[in-house]
Image (spheres, rainbow, N blue to C red):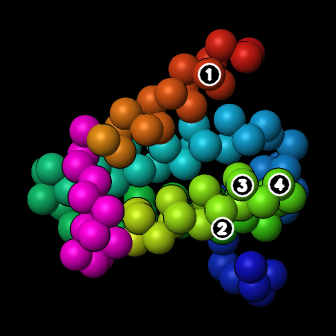
Amino acid sequence: MDKEMNYQHKNLAAGRWNELSFVEQMANIGSEVERALNWQAKHNTRYCQKSIERSLELIDLTLDSVKIFPRLKEIARLREAIVDYFFGTNQFKFTDKSLRKYFLNFTFAARRDR
């Protein structure tokens, strides 16, 4: 990721993100995706766009920190699917419900591990 980028999550980009577990990272990404879905349902394109941008930023921070190939592959595919869902043709056939369900598992796991 370009280090000159203007991060919305400045604290996380400065290294704090790497201190979180993979499950916590995914739960945080899920929170942003959840926000995007909620704004989309309210037909607020501007706020939906901002939430998607933040979720992609967090995904990119995760891609920079992941060292295990299967996880790297999953995160890269997730990024592709989210971009396709919100901006493309939804070739992966996600629904609001399926996206929420995917991330909900990480949210539960992150809470359990506290």
Residue 70's tag is 3
**The residue stretch that appears in magenta:** 84-97
On-image quarter of the C terminus: top right
Residue 7 in sight = yes
In this picture, residue 22 sits left or right of residue 92: right
**Please, what secondary structure does the residue beneath circle 2 have?**
helix
In this picture, residue 92 sits left or right of residue 105: left
Residue 109's tag is 1
On-image quarter of the N terminus: bottom right
Q: Who comes first in sequence, dot 1 or dot 4?
A: 4
**Please, what secondary structure does the residue beneath circle 1 have?**
helix
3D distance between C-alphas at marks 3 and 1: 19 Å
Q: Who comes first in sequence, dot 3 or dot 1?
A: 3
3D distance between C-alphas at marks 3 and 4: 6 Å
The residue type indicated by label 2 comes to: Asp
* Residue with the mark numbered 4: 68
Tell me whether the residue at label 1 lies in contact with that at label 4, contact meaning CB atoms closer than 8 angstroms.
no
The location of residue 10, given as percent across then percent down, is: 72, 62
Q: Who comes first in sequence, dot 2 or dot 3?
A: 2
Taking the spot 53% from the left edge, 64% from the top edge, the residue there is 77
Between disc 2 and disc 3, the foreground one is 3
The location of residue 42, given as percent across then percent down, is: 14, 51
In this picture, residue 69 sits left or right of residue 89: right
3D distance between C-alphas at marks 4 and 2: 15 Å
Q: Is residue 80 above or below residue 92?
A: below
Taking the spot 41% from the left edge, 50% from the top edge, the residue there is 33
Within 10 Å of disc 2 (Cα), the crowding (few <14, some 14-19, many 20+) is some
Q: Quadrant of residue 100?
A: top left
The residue type indicated by label 1 comes to: Ala
Within 10 Å of disc 4 (Cα), the crowding (few <14, some 14-19, many 20+) is few
Does residue 92 show up magenta in the picture? yes
